[in-house]
Amino acid sequence: MTTLDIGNMSLPERLRTMEALWDSLSHDDAQIPSPDWHGDTLSERKKKITEGTAQFLSIREISPKKIS
């Protein structure tokens, strides 16, 4: 399959294909290592929480659409 083939698929076909890929990846035994910056970011966030300087936003505050 090429990217041209994917571009010719309907939206429902592309969504089904994407879901099949995600399902396949989630059952794959191979572990994809996290990049180093993930750990750095988590450490920085944990430090801010511990120091009491972290800022938290609600879903309502970050959502572009109104949530009822």
Image (cartoon, grey):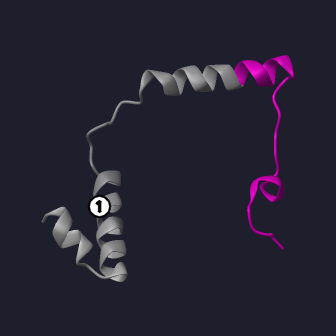
The image quadrant that residue 2 belongs to is: bottom left
Q: Which residue is tagged 1?
A: 21
**Residue sitting at x 84%, y 73%:** 68
Q: Position of residue 18 (x, y in %)?
A: 33, 66
Q: Nearer the viewer, residue 11 or 35?
A: 11
Q: Position of residue 48 (x, y in %)?
A: 77, 22
Q: Position of residue 58 (x, y in %)?
A: 82, 51
User: Which segment is the magenta one?
Assistant: 46-68
Q: Mark 1: few, some, or many residues within 10 Å (few <14, many ≥20)? A: few
Describe residue 61's horizontal placement relative to residue 37 as left or right: right
Q: Is residue 62 magenta?
A: yes
Give the structural element (helix, strand or loop) at label 1.
helix
**Residue sitting at x 49%, y 23%:** 37
Which corner quadrant holds the N terminus? bottom left
Q: Nearer the viewer, residue 67 or 3?
A: 3
Q: Position of residue 53 (x, y in %)?
A: 85, 23
Q: Amino acid at mark 1?
A: Leu
**Residue sitting at x 59%, y 25%:** 41
